[in-house]
Image (spheres, grey):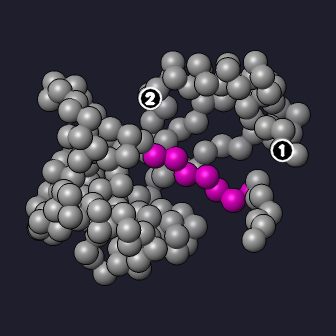
C-alpha cells in the first residue's frame, strides 16, 4: 500500500509531561524522584491499556502491547475516578478525536498545528510549537522545550542532507 504525502494536512505536536501512576517507563529507567518530567514512552502506558469506551476502538490494534503492559505493570488497577484515571481518559480522547476528526480540538480548543514552511523559504528560522500535556486544565502551547537537542539534530541533518525543512525524498 502506498500513501501520497500530504503537505496540507495539519500536523499536531505534543510534549508529554504528566506525572502519575502510569509513568512506568520512568519507573523502569529508575529516574530519581528529584528529576522532574515524564520519560520518553511514558504516554504509551496511558494510551494502550484504556478501558474506556472511546479507547477500546483505538487499542484493539495493539493487543500484544496491551497484554504485556497489563501483565507486567497491572495498568488495569488504576481506577477511572482517580487523577491518573481521569488523565488517561483525557489523553485517549485526544487521540480518538485526532483519529476521528483529524484534529484534537474537541478536547483542547487552542491547540494550533505546526506551521508549514513553504518552498523557497528553506532558510527561515524554524522551531515548532507544541502542546504541553501536563495535567487536565493545565495544557498550553509552548516553544520552551528541548531547544538545544533540536538544534543539534537540525545541524547534523543539514550537514549531510541540506535543510531539514525540505528533505530530499527519492
Please state, as top left, top right, bottom left or bottom right, where the N terminus lies in the image. Answer: bottom right
Q: Is residue 92 visible?
A: no
Q: Nearer the viewer, residue 159 or 74?
A: 74
User: Whole-percent x and y of residue 31?
Assistant: 22, 30
Give the total number of marks visible in the rendering. Answer: 2
- What span is in magenta? 8-14
Q: CA distance from mark 2 to mark 1?
A: 28 Å
x, y (%) of residue 145? 44, 29
- Residue 3 or 122: which is nearer the viewer? 3
Q: Is residue 107 above or below residue 42?
A: below
Q: Is residue 130 visible?
A: yes
Within the magenta stretch, is there residue 5? no
Query: In the displayed structure, does residue 81 sit left or right of residue 117?
Result: left
Task: List the residue tagged with mark 1.
Answer: 169
Judged from the image, the secondary structure of the residue bearing numbered disc 1 is: loop
Q: Position of residue 130 (x, y in %)?
A: 49, 41
Q: Earlier in the sequence, mark 2 or mark 1?
A: 2
Occupied quadrant, residue 118: top right
Q: Residue at x 78, y 67 (%)?
A: 2
Magenta: predominant secondary structure element?
Answer: loop
Q: Nearer the viewer, mark 2 or mark 1?
A: 1
Quadrant in which residue 66 is drawn: bottom left
| Relative height, residue 169 to residue 51 (above, below) | above
Q: Which mark is residue 145?
A: 2
**Numbered badge on residue 103:** none
Q: Which residue does the image show at 46% across and 46% down from the upper left?
A: 14
Q: What is the secondary structure assignment of the residue under circle 2?
A: loop
Amino acid at each position: 500500500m502506498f500513501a501520497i504525502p500530504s503537505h496540507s494536512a495539519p500536523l499536531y505536536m505534543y510534549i508529554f509531561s504528566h506525572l502519575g501512576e502510569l509513568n512506568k517507563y520512568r519507573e523502569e529507567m529508575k529516574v530519581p524522584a528529584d528529576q522532574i518530567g515524564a520519560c520518553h514512552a511514558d504516554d504509551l502506558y496511558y494510551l494502550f491499556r484504556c478501558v474506556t469506551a472511546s479507547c477500546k476502538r483505538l487499542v484493539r490494534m495493539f493487543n500484544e502491547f496491551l497484554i504485556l503492559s497489563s501483565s507486567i505493570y497491572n495498568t488495569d488497577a488504576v481506577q477511572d475516578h482517580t487523577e491518573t484515571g481521569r488523565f488517561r481518559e483525557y489523553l485517549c480522547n485526544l487521540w480518538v478525536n485526532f483519529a476521528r476528526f483529524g484534529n484534537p480540538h474537541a478536547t483542547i480548543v487552542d491547540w494550533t498545528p505546526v506551521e508549514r514552511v513553504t518552498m523557497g523559504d528553506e532558510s527561515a528560522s524554524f522551531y515548532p510549537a507544541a502542546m504541553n500535556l501536563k495535567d487536565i486544565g493545565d495544557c498550553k502551547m509552548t516553544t520552551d522545550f528541548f531547544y538545544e537537542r533540536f538544534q543539534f539534530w537540525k545541524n547534523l541533518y543539514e550537514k549531510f542532507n541540506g535543510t531539514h525543512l525540505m528533505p530530499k525524498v527519492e
